[in-house]
Amino acid sequence: MKVGFVGLGVMGRPMVGHLLAAGHEVAVWARRPAAAQALIADGRFAGVELCTTPAELAARSEVVISMVTASSDVEALAFGADGLAAGFAPGAIHADMSTIAPATARALAARYAAQGVGWLDAPVSGGEIGARDATLAIMAGGEAETLVRVQALFAVLGRTVVHIGPAGAGQVAKACNQMIMVSAIQACAEAMHLANAHGVDLAAVRRALMGGSAASRVMEVMGERMVRRDFQAGIEARLHHKDFAILMNEAVGLGTPLPIAAQVWQQLNALMAQGMGRDDTASLLRVLEGESMRETCGNA
């Protein structure tokens, strides 16, 4: 297929590589020209075409996949000046794999439908490792017929693809995923913080927990980061902060109580306020350590 791709970050680059390896004709556009030029110059991506505007990318593509940051970014990409909508032919598809608000996904689907263009909100879970290993979990919202048409593309990017429901439903599933995952990171940080307060071996505690009912992917990956105090970003904490802003806004709009998520949201706010937004979310441990230090000083 003729595939367009937008979003050449730590996840987007390997995804482009998988599409190329599967024999698809891939073109890219990047908001930061340097990112696109670096990819084109990399011999591993030989054959990738560079487009100068999103409209040009859409005009030569059957499907455009986007992996950008926020709702406003996807809106501008789709319907801004020289946006994808200006180039798409009827029957083309925009599959957005970003994490955005469900309401934004529904609105974009409706606008595209008016010009005969398909839409999928297909956010993913698995992070940089999942993108590199093509083991992403893909949560799709949109028409079932549209999903069938891109199934061959999704098959080379992820291990599981689940059709959640109509437009916006994929983003609802992603919000649930982020709520559980980041809350688990916070719980892991609190466990490590408690173990450290007792002066016991954190690595031994983590090994013990991984052999019991507390074992999880979060404990495996984030627990290891906390033990080694490796806070260099895998996924930057600011992105999880953005995701929590989406789900907490949904909770407010629906009148849905999310008490644990609300407390994790406050810890993410504290992380951002302390300037750790571009570090890994394992830095929630450092937020707790800072709070303990302030409490100790206050009681002195």
Image (cartoon, rainbow, N blue to C red):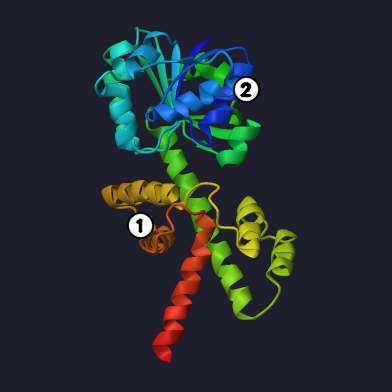
Residue on which the image places disc 2: 44
Residue 33, x across and y down, in percent: 40, 27
| Residue 115 position by quadrant | top left
Most extreme residue toward the bottom, as rendered?
300
Q: Residue at x 46, y 39 (%)?
A: 173
Who is closer to the viewer here, 282 or 228? 228
Q: Which mark is residue 257?
A: 1
Residue neighbourhood size for the residue with mark 2, other residues' Cα within 10 Å, grouped as few (<14), some (14–19), many (≥20): few
Q: At numbered mark 2, what does the secondary structure look like: helix, strand or loop?
A: helix
| Residue 161 position by quadrant | top right
Q: At numbered mark 1, what does the secondary structure look like: helix, strand or loop?
A: loop
Up the image or down, 35 lies above or below 223; here it is: above
**One can see residue 151 in this view:** yes
Q: Residue at x 54, y 63 (%)?
A: 187
Residue neighbourhood size for the residue with mark 1, other residues' Cα within 10 Å, grouped as few (<14), some (14–19), many (≥20): few
- Identify which amino acid the numbered label 2 is placed on: Arg
Up the image or down, 113 lies above or below 166; here it is: above
Q: Which label sits in the foreground, 1 or 2?
A: 2
- Identify which amino acid the numbered label 1 is placed on: Pro
Marks 1 and 2, how far apart at CA? 48 Å
Quarter of the figure that contains the C terminus = bottom left
The reply, left or right, for residue 39 in relation to residue 32 is: right
Who is closer to the viewer here, 269 or 276? 276
The reply, left or right, for residue 170 in relation to residue 84 is: right
**Label 1 vs 2, first from the N-terminus:** 2
Q: Which mark is residue 136?
A: none
Residue 34, x across and y down, in percent: 43, 29
Up the image or down, 269 lies above or below 65; here it is: below
Residue 146, x across and y down, in percent: 45, 16
